[in-house]
Image (spheres, coloured by chain):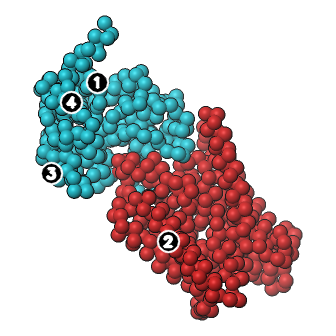
Chain colours: A cyan, B red
Amino acid sequence: MQTLEVWNLAVRRNGKTLLRDVSFSLGSGEWLAIVGPNGAGKSTLMKVLAGEWTYTGVVTLDGRSLNEMKPRERALVMGLMDQGSFSQFAFTVEEVVRMGRYPYRKGIFHTGDPDEDAAVEQALADTGLTGLRHRSVLTLSGGEQQRCALAQALCHQPQVLLLDEPVNHLDLNYQKELYQIADGWRKSASHAVVTVLHDLSAARRFATKALVLSGGKPLSFGSIKESLTDDILNTAWNMDVAGWMREMGEAWR
Amino acid sequence: MKRGQRRVWIVLAGILLTGFVFMLCLCLGSVPIAVRETMNVLRSALTGAVRDDYIGIILLRRRLPRILCAGLIGASLSLSGAVMQGLLRNSLADGSTLGVSSGASLGAAVAIVTGFSVAMGDLTGTTLMAILFAALSLAGVLGLAYALDKSLSTQTIILLGVVYGMLVSALLTLLITFSGEKLRTITFWTLGSLASVNWSSMLLLTGAFVIFGAILLPHAAVLDLFALGESRAAHLGANVRRTKIVCMAAVCALCGVCVSVGGGIGFVGLVTPHMARLVVGPSHKRLLPACALGGANFLMLCDLAARALFSPLELPIGVITSIIGAAVFIALYAKRGRNDANA
């Protein structure tokens, strides 16, 4: 059974079709890169997978329909790291990471999650934030904030990790670090990762599968080799993509 | 370990402070009463021997219910303010943001102008009419918000609350225009006063605080998620819409009861959460109890100032809270601005 299956997905909002005919599947240990030019429908697809937007078609998580899952049930399977600042309130890093355990808590006073402390420690250690645990999130740098968001998502212990343009506005060293953390997590726990990526080089380097979207429709889906062919990329971006990438690479010789 | 110790000290300090403020408010007033005398009266009252002399009547019939009401209203308004600020992710929100408190004020004014009175214990017609109007406002505002925007977005809620508040203010002004000699009563009432509270008001407030507090406190964990933003809260498994409806309804009902007893007491619900965050941090598990305790102390002291500063003349308590609240709020923001500049 595949962890995440999408069949004939379509999204209509305010009378406009934002996405249609999307089908793909993802098993554990796989990393899906969703790529495409601006307005292709990448963020729309992420919003559907995160349970924010309604859709038609079939989306199943672990064999269960996403539409029929309660927010808490969905959160147990799916972890999301998105962009944006955390809060205007001075929560500590540890408090924010700990919030990732919310779906596991039971009862009106939200106690009874025996694995909470261990999961928090693990997530802090995986993202290198153990030393910053008592710092206010308001004082973190951009890279530290993104790592904190990733730690919260990892603390969830989801089966599928959704990363929406995870390295946006990040310095190169943090980009590398973040990709490596996510990659290590995918391999060690054989869980699935879904990322929206602008950086096609990163998609080729880290992802195992790719879905190319253009104008709200899929152009291709499959392994990196099958889906990111020159023809498809050139159609999607309306330029010689591989040629440009090679030209950029040449600049480093 | 150091953090745990700090927490214990804060809790101890809070309890001691409350005890001190409580005794201070009991002893001081237009007639100062010695601490020993006060303790004697309280002790004999507890053993069933209620003293009927002058001192006994002042302490047990006048000051004690009034101080307890001040404490309960302060706790309720501050708790509501903290919940609304977390829920709407807006540091300017408080229990009156939805306009339900204004609705309660309108109800009270209607009762004053029409001379409405019913016999229901010691509760006045003003209080009952205010509760009725608060309930109608709550149903009206939430119902309209839901009809306009099924997702109950923060923007819709704040906008509707502001518009409804303005509408009610206009109606109130209209009422005052035609109120003639009752103008003074209405004005005094809308500024807030605890001069006419009694043991029945105390029971009403206690009931409201216990019921709605019991609804709000278990939402502490989900309010933490809301503070990160609604979509993050949803991703982390929170039932966003249900949380909003339940919390807002409880907040409005609680504030409606407070307004119906004490009138429009401003700034308490807005300022206390900001002060409490400086002491216990933003996590709602600690913030909500801290706000209740801090708000109780704050309002007990403000009420003491209202009745003792220019005794026998009594000031509207809303004037005191607004003056102190505005000063504290500006100080907090100035401090925050400096911190930002240094960061």
Of the pair B14 and B115, the residue shown nearer to us: B115
Chain of the residue that carries numbered disc 1 in the rendered image? A
In the picture, residue A61 is in which quadrant?
top left
Near-viewer residue (B65 or B40):
B65
> Nearer the viewer's eye, disc 3 or disc 2?
2
Q: Name the residue located 55 percent from the left edge and 67 percent from the top edge.
A: B96
Circle nearer the viewer, 4 or 1: 4
Q: Judging from the image, what secondary structure is the residue with disc 4 in?
A: helix
Disc 4 crowd, CA 10 A, few/some/many (<14, 14-19, 20+): few
Is A13 situated left or right of B104 in this image? left
Residue type (three-letter) at the residue carrying disc 1: Ala
Compare marks 4 and 1 and give the one earlier in the sequence: 1
Image coordinates of residue B303 in percent, x first then y, are: 74, 69
The residue at which mark 3 appears reads as A57
Badge nearest the viewer, 4 or 2: 4
In the image, residue B62 above or below residue B91: below
Q: Which mark, by number, is residue B164?
A: 2
